[in-house]
Amino acid sequence: MKLLVLPIGKIRSRPIAELAADYAERLGHYAGLHVIPCRDEAQLLSNLRPGDHVVLLDAGGRERSSEDLAKFLSDHRMRGTKRMCFIIGGPEGVEARSRSRADSSMSLSRMTFPHELAQAILLEQLYRAFTIIKGEPYHK
């Protein structure tokens, strides 16, 4: 399964960009990963294909534990999902057309994070989920 992370906007903070890059590199050992910063929602939506499973990161989405995320990813791999796409809105969130394209929504926390930090947190949680799936010690 390939993973596509579609944030609106680039990470401007150098420390957060380095953190996100570190987890993206680690995650690349487990799954094909592409992070495509988009300037707007039209560009974001143009990266989606029919058959993609699209997850919208949203404050009102389903909260998952790290183990739940691992099970969610594992279940989709078993079902043959070819690409899982994660949408991260900009400071103003996302428009209705991105919401309507999403197959599910997920919240990283009940707290609000800057969209740049949300990207780093998502990448870390995806990495953690794959180490859980593989039974590796990172999660402990």
Image (cartoon, rainbow, N blue to C red):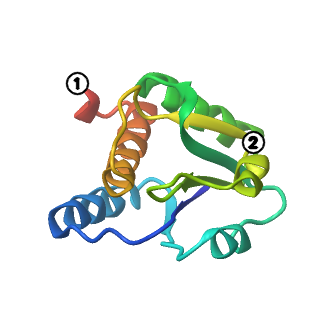
Q: Which mark is residue 103?
A: 2
Mark 1 nearby-residue class (10 Å; few <14, some 14–19, many ≥20): few
37 lies above or below 130: below
Q: Position of residue 44 (x, y in %)?
A: 63, 69
Q: Residues within 10 Å of mark 2 (few under 14, many from 20)?
A: few
- Taking the spot 64% from the left edge, 68% from the top edge, the residue there is 41
Left/right placement of residue 60 relative to residue 108 reads: right
Mark 1 secondary-structure assignment: loop
Which one is nearer the viewer's eye here, 125 or 81?
Answer: 125
Q: Which residue is mark 1?
A: 140
- Quarter where residue 82 is shown: bottom right
Query: With respect to residue 55, does 105 lie above or below?
Result: above
Task: Give me the residue at 74% from left, 51% from top.
Answer: 96
Closest to the observer, 50 or 111: 111
Q: Quadrant of residue 74?
A: top right
User: CA gap, disc 2 to disc 1?
Assistant: 31 Å
Measured from the top left, where is residue 84 in percent x and y? 64, 52
